Amino acid sequence: MATGIPSRAGSSGPREIRIGNHMSEIARVAAMVESFGADHELPSEVIVALNVSLDEILNNIISYAYEDAERHDIVVRLEMRHERYADLEVVVEDDGKAFNPLTVPPPDFGAKPRADGGVGLHFVRKLTDELTYSRRDGINQLRLVKKLAE
Amino acid sequence: MKLVEEVTEDVTIVEAYGRLDSTTATEFGDRLISLVQGGRRSLVVDLKNIAYISSAGFRALLIANRATAEKQGKLALCGVIGEVKRLFDIGNFTDEFLICPTQAEGIGRLRQ
């Protein structure tokens, strides 16, 4: 699960957290996003978009990615970028079974009674500006980009 | 997640604070269901102090809504504002619930 970019202390660099595959661990990610957001004075809309997206993605991984009962690490990395315009890149890596969330069809909002499933990835698509999936050496990597200014 | 409950004669008001996500949805949903099963059939759930709701939280709300209907009760939501309102719209959840602007209006609707 080595990721190449070391996590750095301080308020301006990239931020990384490694959590176990347990639902309660998502609270640590949410706390990191909020602290990162405060350091960068991000609008609450952006913090909410990131936290909802990460909740959906991590819930999916923790619920479905593992076929054993072992502990697995999931890495979440946040980075501000100031290239053509300011944006925020979020990378999630897990060593679960291969799963490309971009292949999941959108939910059927016409279904009655309302189906419980399918809306999670719809939230991720609507709340982020770019989504990329790759798999390399047994690691799923999902990359999200959230634009901050035009 | 923190829940503050106020019990009036016929309506129970539940004010939720914090995040309604994968880490809190079960506790939140279980509390609403246990109120309904304990005979509190009119619930107003105030979401104005909720930072955000993910699909796990919406699932808990849908289940509580159905459980209330099965007991011939009613569940009203209020405080659906700001980012939470936006998430209701994105997830197409607005039509699934009785949504009232304030607690008082929610109580009024449940007493009709």
Image (cartoon, coloured by chain):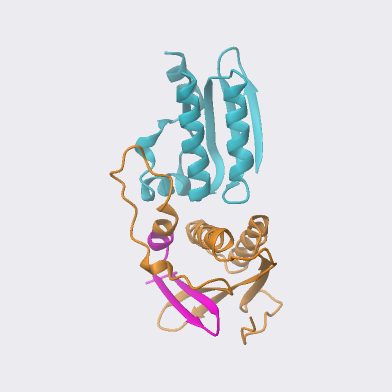
Chain colours: A orange, B cyan
Left or right: where does residue B12 sit relative to residue A144?
A: right
Give above or below for B54 relative to B98: below
Q: Is residue A13 magenta?
A: no
Residue A88 appearing in the image: no
Q: Position of residue B20 (x, y in %)?
A: 57, 46
Residue at 65% x, 57% y: name it: A27
Q: Residue furthest front?
A: A68
Q: Quadrant of the C terminus of chain A?
A: bottom left
Q: Position of residue A120 (x, y in %)?
A: 45, 55
- Of A3 and B67, the residue lying toward us: B67
Q: Position of residue B63 (x, y in %)?
A: 49, 36
Residue stretch rendered in magenta on the structure: A124-150
- Of B1 and A118, the residue lying toward us: A118
Q: Quadrant of the N terminus of chain A?
A: bottom right
Q: Position of residue B94 (x, y in %)?
A: 37, 39
Q: Residue furthest bottom?
A: A4
Give above or below for A130 relative to B95: below
Left or right: where does residue B51 sit relative to residue A133?
A: right
Q: Is residue A139 magenta?
A: yes
Residue at 46% x, 79% y: name it: A134
Q: Kindly indicate the quadrant of the structure image that contains residue A8.
A: bottom right
